[in-house]
Image (cartoon, rainbow, N blue to C red):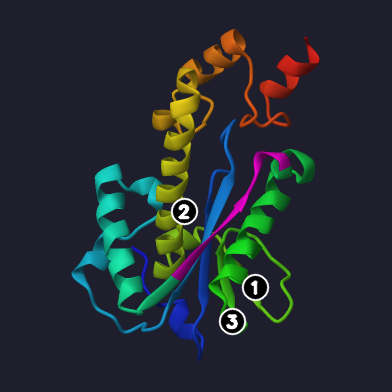
């Protein structure tokens, strides 16, 4: 389970960063940056915090409410950054992911701090030492919290888009390439929210 062991290796606050949305066929990639101001906090609810992919929707929402309460009491601070479908297609998904992460860090509006990031990623932000951690969302509470925040916000965003484009079932598949989603792409075509650089959309476009 994630804890504050990594955070405590530093003699200052650190920023935990994670993203959601690298794999889907539609929608943006969204990142979150999180600072815990007290690494000695002991809250039973923290036991629920884990890599967002390992949590049920009910538990994610429960933890999300706790996260908001912690921010309101100024025990943590978090922010969001997004890279659009257009940026994903123009830059590639890895560079767009880094861009969304940089935007999240800048939106924190804090003096430069060390960054701990899920995965082998170096943001190369000036004055921000960047440390990529494999499976960081399973080790660090800051990174795990960032993954939950990003996941909840992205799921809500895709649900909002699904009201305008109901055929693709984004409210349940979040833009991922499920069988039904791909079938609807073949039947209805693509939207402005689909990633044209991703397969099978890329091949479908070229074969027309």
Determine whether, in the image, residue 92 is placed left or right of residue 30. Answer: right
* Mark 2 → mark 3, Cα distance in angstroms: 20 Å
Which residue occupies 40% across, 63% down?
Answer: 145
Quadrant containing the N terminus in the rendered view:
bottom left
Q: Residue at x 30, y 78 (%)?
A: 73
At horizontal 63% and vertical 14% (from top left) the residue drawn is 189
Question: Of the residues tagged 2 and 1, which is closer to the observer?
Answer: 2
Which of the image's four quarters has the C terminus? top right
Question: Closer to the camera, 97 or 190?
Answer: 190
Q: CA distance from mark 3 to mark 1?
A: 9 Å
Q: Earlier in the sequence, mark 3 or mark 1?
A: 3
Taking the view exactly as shown, the residue that stands out farthest to the left is 44
Q: Of callouts 2 and 1, which one flags the residue occurring earlier in the amino acid sequence?
A: 1
Report helix, strand or loop for mark 3: loop
Q: For mark 1, does the 10 Å Cα neighbourhood hold few (<14), some (14 to 19), or many (20 or more) residues?
A: some
**Which mark, by number, is residue 150?**
2
Distance Cα–Cα, label 2 vs label 1: 19 Å
The percent position of residue 118, horizontal first and vertical second, equals 54, 60
Identify the secondary structure beneath mark 2.
Answer: helix
Q: Is residue 201 magenta?
A: no
Is the stretch drawn in magenta largely helix, strand or loop?
Answer: strand
Q: Is residue 167 above or below residue 124?
A: above
Q: Nearer the viewer, mark 3 or mark 1?
A: 3
- Where is mark 3, residue-wise? 113
The local crowd at label 2, few if under 14, some if 14 to 19, many if 20 or more residues have their Cα within 10 Å, is many
Q: Depth check: 160 or 141 in front?
A: 160
Image disc number at residue 130: 1
Label pair 2/3, CB-CB below 8 angstroms: no
Segment tinted magenta in the rendering: 78-86
The location of residue 179, given as percent across then percent down, is 49, 17
Q: Give x and y (percent) for residue 103.
A: 63, 63
């Amino acid at each position: 389970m994630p804890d504050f062991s990594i955070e405590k290796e530093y003699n200052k606050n650190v920023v935990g960063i994670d993203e959601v949305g690298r794999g889907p066929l539609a929608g943006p990639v969204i990142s979150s940056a999180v600072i815990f101001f007290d690494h000695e906090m002991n809250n039973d609810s923290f036991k629920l915090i884990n890599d967002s992919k390992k949590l049920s929707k009910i538990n994610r929402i429960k933890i999300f409410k706790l996260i908001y309460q912690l921010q309101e009491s100024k025990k943590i601070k978090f922010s969001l950054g997004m890279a659009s479908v257009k940026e994903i297609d123009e830059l590639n998904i890895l560079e767009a992911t880094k861009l969304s992460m940089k935007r999240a860090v800048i939106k924190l509006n804090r003096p430069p701090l060390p960054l701990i990031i899920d995965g082998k990623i170096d943001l190369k932000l000036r004055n921000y030492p960047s440390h990529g951690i494999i499976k960081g969302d399973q080790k660090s509470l800051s990174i795990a919290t960032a993954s939950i925040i990003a996941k909840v916000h992205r799921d809500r965003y895709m649900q909002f888009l699904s009201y305008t484009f109901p055929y693709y079932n984004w409210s349940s598949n979040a833009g991922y390439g499920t069988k039904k989603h791909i079938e609807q792409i073949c039947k209805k075509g693509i939207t402005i929210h689909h990633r044209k650089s991703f397969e099978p959309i890329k091949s479908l476009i070229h074969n027309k």
